[in-house]
Image: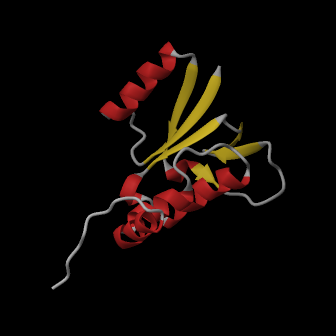
Amino acid sequence: MKNIWVLYSDSCNESYEIKRLKDVSLANDINIEVFEPSDFEIILNNDKDGMYVKGIKRELPDYFFPRLGSSTSYFGFTIIREFERLNVPVINSSDSISMVKDKLHCQQVLAKNGLPTVVNIIL
């Protein structure tokens, strides 16, 4: 069984999104746990076997799925980067979240890569 941790701004698990994720995961033999950024403790060392969650050392998940959106804070980015450093596959990397938070930068990256963008005329 695969284990996925979801970083969500409201871990009450009452949102439609989280309910659907859990429903689909059960049908596909996947265990999903939902956490808030405040649940994590970042302890910098060379121990790559675990992460402290709510004061308890936990084995790393198979995948990490941040779902903070535009509300991603500095600490949220720190958590995401720590999972990247620990080589846990992260869906929605810290770089991609940072890029889409800056609309102009996002348009620049799309244009640089030859993707169509909205033409903005500044008067």
Residue ranking furthest to the right: 46
Tell me where residue 1 sits by quadrant: top right
Q: Is residue 14 visible?
A: no
Q: Is residue 51 above or below residue 80?
A: above
Residue 54: percent from left, percent from top: 60, 44
Q: Nearer the viewer, residue 80 or 13?
A: 80
Residue ranking furthest to the front: 114
Please give the name of the residue rendered at 64% of the width and 54% of the height, measured from the top-left corner. 41
Q: Is residue 1 left or right of residue 100?
A: right
Residue 97: percent from left, percent from top: 47, 58
Residue ranking furthest to the left: 123
Residue ranking furthest to the bottom: 123
Please give the name of the residue rendered at 45% of the width and 24% of the height, measured from the top-left corner. 22
Q: Is residue 75 visible?
A: yes
Please give the name of the residue rendered at 44% of the width and 20% of the height, measured from the top-left corner. 24
Q: Is residue 4 above or below residue 38?
A: above
Q: Is residue 57 left or right of residue 26?
A: right
